[in-house]
Amino acid sequence: SVALTGYGSLIEKGEFLEETIHDLRDALYRYPVDISIWQTLGDAYARNNQLQDALDAYTSAEGLLG
């Protein structure tokens, strides 16, 4: 989606990571099976050096694929 593309750009720049993580977690509350949100959240966590949280998010995305 367009919104996720915007978040991807912020994540790449390392800007507004806490806000991005908050927004993505809020989005997942409403859309818990959206794989792209889980993946983007994982990227945000990884960029913010929250590696276990990133792994958990990627694992959730992978679980939805299967």
Image (tube, helix red, strand yellow):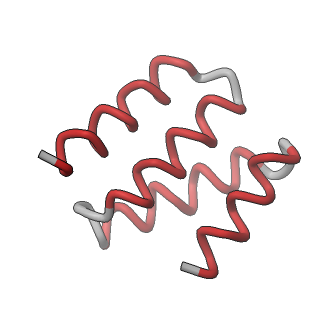
- Most foreground residue, 53 or 65: 65
Question: Residue, x 66% and y 56% (percent of image)?
Answer: 20
Name, please, the residue furthest toward the left.
Answer: 66
Left or right of 42 on screen, residue 5:
right
Name, please, the residue furthest toward the bottom.
Answer: 2
Question: Residue, x 45% and y 63% (percent of image)?
Answer: 26
Question: Residue, x 59% and y 40% (percent of image)?
Answer: 43
Q: Is residue 5 above or below residue 15?
A: below
Question: Residue, x 43% and y 67% (percent of image)?
Answer: 27
- Most foreground residue, 51 or 39: 39
Give residue 50's position: percent from left, percent from top: 59, 23
Q: Is residue 57 above or below residue 18?
A: above
Quadrant of image for the N terminus: bottom right
Q: Is residue 3 above or below residue 10?
A: below
Quadrant of image for the C terminus: top left
Q: How many marks?
A: 0
Image quadrant where residue 55 sits? top left
Give residue 54's position: percent from left, percent from top: 49, 29
Name, please, the residue furthest toward the front.
Answer: 66
Give residue 21's position: percent from left, percent from top: 59, 49
Q: Is residue 46 above or below residue 32?
A: above
Give residue 31's position: percent from left, percent from top: 30, 70
